[in-house]
Amino acid sequence: MRGHWAVVVATAAARRTLSDRAGLAVGTLFYLLVTGVISTVWRTAAGESDTGLVAGYSAAALGWYLAASEVTAVAINPRLIEAIGEDIAGGAVESEMLRPAPVVGVRLAAALGTALPRIACCAVGGSALALATAGSPPDAAGLALAAPALVLGVACNVATQHAAAAAAFWLRDAKSAWFLYQKFVFMLGGLLLPIEVLPGWLERVATLLPFAAMAYVPGRLASGHVEPGLLLVQVGWLAVMTALAALAFARGERRLQAVGA
C-alpha cells in the first residue's frame, strides 16, 4: 500500500458502498424525496413572485440548484462529526495510530470513497428529477462544471467535519460540535436555499466561510451560472480544511500518547 494507500483505501470503501445495494437504493430514494419536496416549495415561491425570480433564480434554476446542493448532504454520514468523536473517545483512533499511514488521511480517503457511489447515484437521480419537474438545465456548461464541484463539495465537507470533530481529543464529546456544524451548513452553506436569499451582511459572511464551498457552489453552477472560479474556491478551502484537520489530529494524537504514557 506504500505510496498508494489513499487510492487503495478509497477504492475499498467505494466497493463496500456498491456492494450494499439496498442501502444505496434507500439513500437515493431518501435524497429524491427530500429534494422533491424542498424543490417544489422554492419553485412555487418563484412562480408566485411578481418577477418570477427568487434572489435572481428562476423556478427552473432553483430546481437544478437544489438537485445539486442536496447531494452533498446525503452522500455522507449526516452525523459524521459525532461518529468521529465516538471513535476518539472510545479508543478506536488509538488503535488506528499503529498503522503506517496517517489516521486522518486514511479516514478522509475512506469517507470520500464511501461517498463517491452515493454522489453518482444521487446525481443521476437528481438530474432526472430536475428534468421532469423543472425542465432542461439552464446552462449545459454550468451543469458540466457542477459534476466536479459535487466531489469537491463533499470532500470539503468531510475535511471540515474531521477538523471540527478533533475537538473530541480534548472534550471527549463531539455532539455539540455536530449540532453547531449542521446549523452552519444549513444556513450559511446554501444547502436549503441559495445564499443570495440571506440578508446582505449575512450573505457576505457566508462567502467568507468554508460552508459555501460545500453545497452552494455545486448548486450555483448547476443552476446555470457558469463561474469556473468557484471550483478554485473549493480547491482552496479543501486544502485549508484538510491541513487544519491533519494538524488537529496530529496534536490530538500526541495528547493521547502523552496521556497513555
Image (cartoon, grey):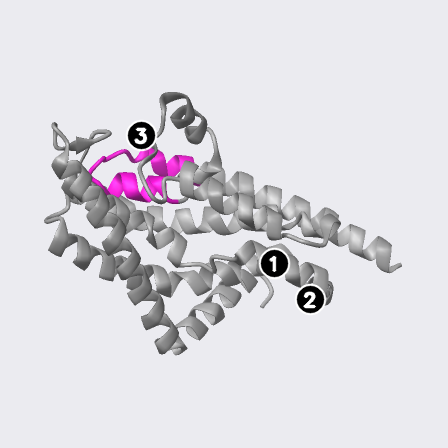
Q: Which mark is residue 118?
A: none
The spot of residue 141 in percent (x, y) is: 19, 42
The spot of residue 214 in percent (x, y) is: 41, 44
- Mark closer to the chain start, 3 or 1: 1
In the rendered view, does 20 fall on the left or right side of 111?
left
Kindly check if marks 3 and 1 are in contact, taking CB atoms under 8 A apart as contact: no
Query: What is the spatial separation of the Cα atoms under label 2 and label 1, in whole angstroms?
Result: 9 Å
In front of the other: 107 or 259: 259
Q: Amino acid at mark 3?
A: Glu
Q: Residue at x 18, y 57 (%)?
A: 129
| Label 2 element class | helix
Residue 241 inside the magenta-drawn segment = no
Kindly check if marks 2 and 1 are in contact, taking CB atoms under 8 A apart as contact: no
Quadrant where the image shows the C terminus: bottom right
| Label 1 element class | helix
Q: Residue at x 32, y 64 (%)?
A: 30
In the rendered view, does 85 fall on the left or right side of 142?
right
Mark 2 vs mark 3: in front: 3
Q: Residue at x 40, y 78 (%)?
A: 19
Residue 226 inside the magenta-drawn segment = yes
Q: Amino acid at mark 2?
A: Ala
Quadrant where the image shows the N terminus: bottom right
Q: Give neighbour class at mark 3: few <14, some 14-19, many 20+ (Cα, 10 Å).
A: some
Query: What is the spatial separation of the Cα atoms under label 2 and label 3, in whole angstroms?
Result: 42 Å
Find the magenta span and give its range.
Answer: 215-235
Q: Residue at x 47, y 46 (%)?
A: 156
Quarter of the image for residue 224 reads: top left
Q: Which mark is residue 84?
A: 1
Q: Which residue is mark 3?
A: 196
Predominant secondary structure, magenta span: helix
Kindly check if marks 2 and 3 are in contact, taking CB atoms under 8 A apart as contact: no
Q: Which mark is residue 92?
A: 2
